[in-house]
Image: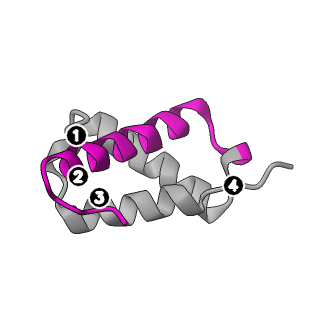
Amino acid sequence: MNIVKPKNLMVLSLSILLVACGNDISRLSDDDLRKKIQECDYAIESEMTAAEHQVCDNYHRECKRRFDEGRFVCN
């Protein structure tokens, strides 16, 4: 039986939340974005679905966008 790990469940929950909220990552506070990036970075990539990878890629892209604006958010 395949057991869902807490980290994977969290990323999946975030994915569903983003879909429900219109996927507007730019509205996340810097602190919330930093937390989501940390969750993605600690998730086990081999156990992530394609959708979870995409959500994490979107978070990283938003961090880069904020960094390019002069906001050092995600490191």
The amino acid marked with disc number 2 is Phe
Which residues, given as a range, are shown in magenta? 46-75
Callout 1–callout 4 Cβ contact below 8 Å: no
Label 4 – label 3 distance at C-alpha: 24 Å
Label 2 – label 3 distance at C-alpha: 12 Å
First reached walking from the N terminus: tag 1 or tag 4: 4
Residue 53 picture location, percent across and down: 54, 38
Is disc 2 surrounded by few (<14), some (14 to 19) or many (20+) residues within 10 Å?
Answer: some
Is disc 1 surrounded by few (<14), some (14 to 19) or many (20+) residues within 10 Å?
Answer: few
Residue 4 is tagged as 4
Is disc 3 surrounded by few (<14), some (14 to 19) or many (20+) residues within 10 Å?
Answer: many
Could you say whether the residue bearing mark 3 is in a helix, strand or loop?
Answer: helix
Is disc 4 surrounded by few (<14), some (14 to 19) or many (20+) residues within 10 Å?
Answer: few
Could you say whether the residue bearing mark 1 is in a helix, strand or loop?
Answer: loop
The amino acid marked with disc number 1 is Cys
Label 1 – label 2 distance at C-alpha: 24 Å
Residue that numbered label 1 is attached to: 21
Residue 38 is tagged as none
Residue at left offset 64%, top offset 43%: 48
Residue at left offset 81%, top offset 49%: 2
